[in-house]
Image: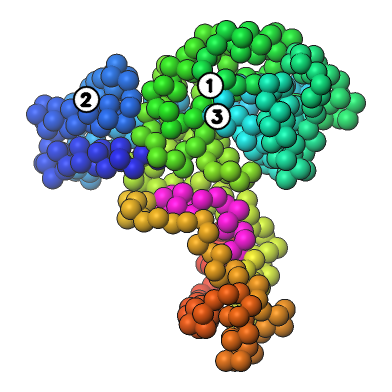
Amino acid sequence: MFENLSERLESAFKQIKGEGRVTDLNVANTVKEIRKALIDADVNFKIAKEFTDKVREKAMGQKVLTAISPGQLMVKIVKDELAELMGGTESELNLQGNPAVILIAGLQGSGKTTFSGKLANYLKTKKGKSPLLVACDIYRPAAIDQLKILGEQINVEVYSDPENKDAVSIAKQAIAVAKSKNKNVVIIDTAGRLAIDEVMMTEVANIKAAMQPQEILFVVDSMTGQDAVNTAKAFHDRLDFSGVVLTKLDGDTRGGAALSIRYTVNEPIKFVSSGEKMETLDVFYPERMAQRILGMGDITTLVEKAQSQFDEEQARKLEKKIRKNQFDFQDFLDQLQQIKKMGSLKDLMSMIPGVGKAMKDVDISDDAFKGVEAIIHSMTPTERANPDLIDMNRKKRIAKGCGKDISDVNQFMKQFEQMRDMMKSMNKMPMGGRMGMGRR
């Protein structure tokens, strides 16, 4: 996401980079290119013009310090204005109530049901809540089945009543069930349509009136661009929802929805979602997103993702093994599993400053580790724990077991040894220098 916009903005900044001072002319040329970039990213013209007018006003009103260049100044102004356009600061969920009720709305295909599962998982693992998922899509049996499957994956109970064709009645019954089972959050997945229609709007409005939810989250497919903004406005006029969720951020999208939707409905973007994994849900931080758009990366989010997967005790044990040169294939496999839980590999790479741009044309599959995992899974427990035991005969057996060529096994073994050699050199570093991330 935002790759084309990032490139266009970088090109716009070239108008002023290398200049010794800010002038009417170089600011005007830069602002003109920024406006074109935003419109090309499917941002509404009115929003793009208002945004660039603010940028011009701030740029002309500031003196350039000797420590920074006009180009650096312009980048900072654009970053600050992008963050403000997307909401300024993150927005917390309102979880007051016993139970707190969260109503999920949106068009069919926007990712409502998947998001409902992700939200339940987030509230359970990150907030210590006990959620209940409620299947209120009375028109699509597959939606009920999908929610049940997701509930099983994350070990969260799902309430449904397939024979009942009254969504309001199902929601009311779910509240009673939640109270009886001490569930403190109820997440109601409502029906969607292929387009906005009166029946759908009336039904979800009736659920809102009956449930008085603490939160109404509108789920929007970010790949639909400006159409998503128009749909959000129609829903907001009817539901007065409290927050927006942007899904499919890993898709081929120009980013117009993320930049325009907050301005249009004046409600915060609360979450962003990518992929199908239940862990791939992030709180929306406008400042961090602005940094990513401008190619600055997002180290803060990357560190938080790592910290959520690697606990202090694991870090200590692993560090001791590395110090003693005892890092083995099982350790390596465990680390791969933890990394995969952090989300899409390409998305993780994009959070490293400078790497996102370098990797933009490289296709990084989330299946990239499958070959390595297959090789390790073909080893015996003894071989995994003792890499030095593996001779040519064992390599041949491992290759046969995982369906790989012996050359593939040899290459992996060579790379693993190179990594262990690197770890040996790291032994000379202080204890806190290497594994500090896991203990912050």
Q: Which x, y percent locates residue 119? A: 65, 35
Label 2 CA crowd tier, 10 Å (few <14, some 14–19, many 20+): some
Disc 3 residue type (three-letter): Gly
Q: From the image, tell me which residue sits under label 1.
A: 194
Secondary structure at badge 1 equals: loop
**Chain-order first, disc 1 or disc 2:** 2
Q: Compared to 204, does 343 lie above or below?
A: below
Q: From the image, tell me which residue sits under label 3.
A: 109
Q: From the image, tell me which residue sits under label 2.
A: 56
Q: Residue furthest left?
A: 25
Q: Which x, y percent locates residue 344? A: 51, 50
Q: Report if the CB atoms under discs 2 and 3 are less than 8 Å apart.
A: no
Whole-number angstrom distance, CA of label 3 to CA of label 1: 8 Å
Q: Report if the CB atoms under discs 1 and 2 are less than 8 Å apart.
A: no
Of residues 164 and 118, the one nearer the viewer is 164
Q: Which residues are magenta?
A: 335-354
Secondary structure at badge 2 equals: helix
